[in-house]
Image: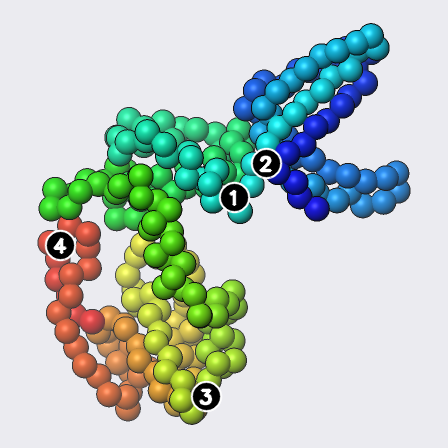
Amino acid sequence: MESDDFELRIDDRDNAVTLPNRGASIEVFLGYNGSALIRLGRYTVDEVELSGPPDTLVIRGKVSDKNHLEGFVRQFKWALSSRQIFEWQKMTRPETLTDIQLAARFFYLQHHAFGGKVSGQSFGTATPAPAINLLRIEENLSAAWQRLSGTYVENLPWLECAERYDRPHSFHYMDPPYWQTAGYGVDFPFENYERMADFMRRCKGKVMVSINVHPDIQRVLEGFHFETTEIRYTTTNQRQGKA
């Protein structure tokens, strides 16, 4: 029940309603006394009109929804990759933003954050490659969509997902957090590596795992074929290790 536009008329004969600013966000719900409210969408105030008598406040706006690609892309018109803009975006209070503005803020910060960090972000640069082209966001999103089209996207616990899709022809690729390394931001206790090894021994398909070389890991995966390679762990490309 969402519309691209809305018009809200309020009886304001007692002057109890504060006029919203243009660009403010309004979330609209519809319901009756004693019944649950139905969300009609979030909108951005585009026009405010006061008429009367009797005093009537008319608020008009346009949809502000994360599902509208055009509105999202418009947020980046004339935008630059700037350290100062990055800091301003970090300081912006999320509760003051519309859905589209929230999505644009997340996108800008994530693409400019050093190492792609989601917390403790700092502005990242790389001289061998140009900065992200903010004018081609729609093309980049389209390319990502094309890569994902034809696939199933699940939101399940990892083991439940693996068991659901396990078939004799299945190939499972597992990339769990490297044991006793920091920076993942998720809890992945050692019992999960044991459950992974148990699944590998009883599954119908084939499994490939990317994991660091560690005595505990070698013990829990004993009996499986190992191949090692030298990789660099950090975004600074200064430290090497085995996986």
Find disc 3 in the rendering and name its residue: 167
| Label 1–label 2 contact, CB within 8 A | yes
Find disc 2 in the rendering and name its residue: 63
Query: What's the CA distance linking mark 1 and mark 4?
Result: 39 Å
Q: Secondary structure at mark 2?
A: strand
Query: What's the CA distance linking mark 3 and mark 1?
Result: 38 Å
Find disc 1 in the rendering and name its residue: 68
Q: Nearer the viewer, mark 3 or mark 1?
A: 1
* Colour mode of the rendering: rainbow
Which kind of residue does numbered mark 3 sit on?
Answer: Arg
Instruction: Compare marks 3 and 1 and give the one earlier in the sequence.
Output: 1
Judge the density around disc 3: few (<14), some (14-19), many (≥20) Cα neighbours within 10 Å: some
* Residue 131 percent across, percent down from the top left: 21, 41
Which kind of residue does numbered mark 1 sit on?
Answer: His
* Residue 153 percent across, percent down from the top left: 48, 66
Q: Nearer the viewer, mark 3 or mark 4?
A: 3
Please name the residue shown 24% across and 71% down the image.
212
Residue 235 vertical position relative to residue 68 in the rendered view, above or below: below
Instruction: Compare marks 4 and 2 and give the one earlier in the sequence.
Output: 2
Please name the residue shown 35% across and 87% down the image.
206
Query: What's the CA distance linking mark 2 and mark 3?
Result: 45 Å
Which kind of residue does numbered mark 2 sit on?
Answer: Val
